[in-house]
Image (cartoon, rainbow, N blue to C red):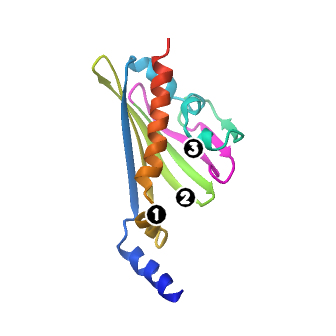
């Protein structure tokens, strides 16, 4: 057991301490239509992949939605945990940035963004996520395939956004 603890502690000295994920999709809809679905927290919730993990998640909103400072709070089962998301920057119609505070199952923070750009008679949507892991929790990045775990959910959400924007 002591050897395992030492291995984790030593490995943590060399493991990455940051994680970045970015996924994108091209949506066959004008930017203003896509913007309507990414510029406020209630609209983002409509295509969120996380609700699949807990259909009974408790959600609340604070502040004027679609503005900097508005907040989305959630409390769910062990798969979604609890936390909050606060809009920190809005540049219409190009970018929405938010800060995430995860409370359960582990305390953590991250920054996420959604960027829109014109693309072949449609809109390219880029959804990204950046976080830091403290030592020795950063060792987890060597044993958990975050790209597969998070990337699958991001792709699912982007495909839902595409279907939502291309409908009608």
Q: CA distance from mark 1 to mark 3?
A: 18 Å
Residue sitting at 40 percent across and 51 percent down? 147
Residue at the left extreme of this rendering:
120
- In the image, is residue 89 part of the stretch drawn in magenta? yes
First of labels 2, 1 by sequence position: 2
Residue 9 vs 21, above or below: the answer is below
Q: Is residue 125 left or right of residue 53?
A: left
Residue 40's spot in the image, x, y percent?
55, 30
Q: Which residue is mark 2?
A: 108
Residue 48's spot in the image, x, y percent?
55, 35
**Closer-to-camera residue (89/158):** 158
Residue sitting at 44 percent across and 38 percent down? 155
Element assignment for label 1:
loop
**Closer-to-camera residue (112/88):** 112
Q: CA distance from mark 2 to mark 1?
A: 8 Å
Q: Quadrant of the N terminus?
A: bottom right
- In the image, is residue 135 part of the stretch drawn in magenta? no
Q: Which residues are magenta?
A: 69-94
Badge 1 density bin: few <14, some 14–19, many ≥20, Cα 10 Å: some
């Amino acid at each position: 057991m002591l050897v395992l603890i030492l291995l984790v502690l030593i490995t943590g000295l060399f493991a990455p301490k940051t994680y970045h994920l970015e996924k994108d999709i091209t949506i066959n809809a004008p930017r203003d239509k896509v913007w309507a679905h990414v510029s406020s927290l209630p609209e983002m919730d409509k295509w969120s992949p996380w609700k699949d993990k807990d259909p009974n998640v408790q959600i609340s909103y604070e502040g004027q939605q679609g503005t900097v400072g508005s907040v989305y709070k959630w409390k769910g089962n062990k798969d979604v945990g609890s936390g909050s998301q606060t809009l920190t920057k809005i540049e219409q119609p190009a970018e929405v940035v938010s800060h995430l505070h995860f409370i359960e199952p582990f305390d953590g923070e991250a920054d996420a963004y959604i960027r829109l750009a014109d693309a072949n008679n449609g809109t390219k949507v880029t959804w990204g996520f950046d976080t830091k892991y403290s030592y020795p929790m950063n060792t987890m990045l060597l044993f958990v395939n975050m790209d597969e775990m998070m990337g699958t959910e991001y792709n699912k959400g982007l495909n839902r956004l595409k279907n939502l924007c291309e409908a009608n």
